[in-house]
Image (cartoon, rainbow, N blue to C red):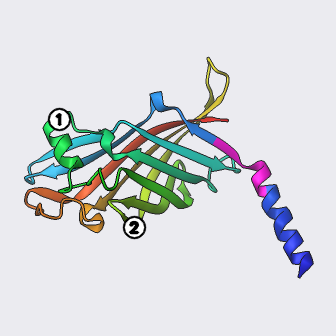
Amino acid sequence: MKRITLIAAIAMVSIATFAQTWSLDKSHAKLGFTITHLMISDVEGSFKTFDVTLTASKEDFSDAIITLTADVNSINTDNEKRDGHLKSPDFFDAAKYPALSFKSKSFTHVSGKNYKLTGDLTMHGITKTITLDVIYNGTITHPMTKKLVAGFKVSGTFKRSDFGIGSTFPGSVLSDDVNLIANVEFVKQ
């Protein structure tokens, strides 16, 4: 039993030793969403304040662990009145739930540049597992900083009703489906 425990501990230390942390380049990142209004037009928005970390030991990121946090009070739809309403108890209730988060469970290579990212999304005090599509745009050495930089595009859909957001607004006013889109660059630390 001691031998198995020792082998497991050595394996965990070895994996941790080779894992690399990548930090978000905030000047080259956007976390956005789209929702359909009155079933005739899309309204876009974003979170201005968010952070993402990525840890991986494999070059193709197929073992990546990804965490995200976003400040709900930073929501921006280019309309102050609407942004204020989104922060209210009718929607996000930012006073009670000031942050949303995502923590990955898996990052699976599908084919070519395509991956599936599965994890727990927590908003409005509710946690649900969602799966997102990811395109890995590649890794290069930044010509100015000489650091490795990796780029990803993330997209997917989830239901606002699963998180109790805007429950008094029927689907004829706001779609239940919320489309998420994020473009991110990470810098290897």
Q: Is 155 on the left-hand or right-hand side of 150?
A: left
Q: Quadrant of the C terminus?
A: top right
Q: Residue furthest top?
A: 144
What residue appears at the point 8 percent right and 56 percent down from the top-left corner? Answer: 173
4 in relation to 73, above or below = below
Q: Is 54 on the left-hand or right-hand side of 123?
A: right
Q: Which residue is mark 1?
A: 80
Looking at the rendering, which quadrant does residue 32 occupy? top left
Q: Is 51 on the left-hand or right-hand side of 149?
A: left
The three-letter code of the residue at mark 2 reads: Lys
Mark on residue 128?
Answer: 2
CB contact under 8 Å: marks 1 and 2: no
Quick one: SS at disc 2? strand
What residue appears at the point 62 percent right and 31 percent down from the top-left corner? Answer: 140
- What is the x, y in percent for residue 141? 65, 27
The CA distance from mark 1 to mark 2 is: 29 Å
Q: Earlier in the sequence, mark 1 or mark 2?
A: 1
The residue stretch that appears in magenta: 15-21
Q: Residues within 10 Å of mark 2 (few under 14, many from 20)?
A: few
- What is the x, y in percent for residue 12? 78, 62
Q: Residue furthest bottom?
A: 1
Q: Quadrant of the N terminus?
A: bottom right
